[in-house]
Image: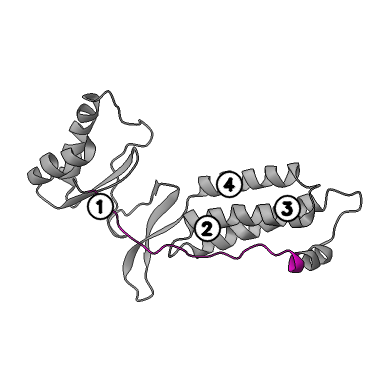
Amino acid sequence: MLDLWFEQTVKPRLQGSAFEVRFADDAVLVFEREEDARRVLAVLGKRLAKYGLRLHPDKTRLLDFRKPGRKGQSFQYLGFTHYWGRSRKGRWVVKRKTAQARLSRSLQAINHWCRMHRHWPVADQQAALSRKLKGHYAYYGIVGNSQSLARFLYEVRRRWYKWLSRRNRERMNRDHFGRLYKRYPLPPPRVVHGIARCVATP
């Protein structure tokens, strides 16, 4: 419904270039010219209405995402914050990091899990937390997101220590946890995805 319309009807009528990035019912339409973007946004709701669909009022917006110095902004998409940054060679490139809201939500879930399972054997806790971390890395482990991955591991480790130290009357000190962690370490951050631009095709 969206892909074919955008490729066959919209793009031939534009003054500049454009492309679509879509995952399930979330999409980003990118335009070279602002006037093209405004024209498509004006009719997009009508296109969706033909199929009994509607635009999400909070997620739908027109964003100026040109290079910094020209009102550059960031935006959230699929759990990532997309923003402009410098490459190692000093060029402006689009970078991605874990969105703060997603990071907070994931850590809340980890905190709840550690609290509810703090009386499990340490080896079992380590195995379960390792699976959770590997799952997080599998999704968010993209090039340029190493700092967010490292922060996630650090915060998971903090919460694990917090709830391990509360399962007995005598709280575990940091030295004790450090020795325990050497025996039961959590997997380090791992980048598993390169940067690929998925452009919808008919």
Q: Disc 2 and disc 1: Cα gap in Å?
A: 24 Å
Tell me where the magenta segment starts and ends, as one range. Answer: 181-200
Amino acid carrying mark 1 in the image: Val
The residue to which callout 1 is attached is: 199
Secondary structure of the residue carrying tag 4 is: helix
Q: Nearer the viewer, residue 95 or 177?
A: 177
> Which of label 3 and label 1 is nearer to you?
3
Q: Earlier in the sequence, mark 3 or mark 1?
A: 3
Quadrant of the drawing holding the C terminus: top left
Whether residue 161 is in magenta: the answer is no
State the CA–CA distance, disc 2 to disc 4: 12 Å
| Residues at marks 3 and 1, CA–CA distance in whole angstroms | 41 Å
Q: Mark 2 near mark 1, Cβ–Cβ under 8 Å?
A: no
Q: Under tag 3, what secondary structure?
A: helix
Question: Which residue does the numbered mark 2 point to in the structure image?
Answer: 137
- Residue at mark 4: 106
* Front label number (2 vs 3): 3
Residue 3 percent across, percent down from the top left? 21, 41
Query: Overall secondary structure of the magenta stretch?
Result: loop
Residue at the right extreme of this rendering: 169
Whether tag 2 and tag 4 are in contact, CB under 8 A, the answer is no
Q: At x 15% / y 44%, what residue is drawn?
A: 7
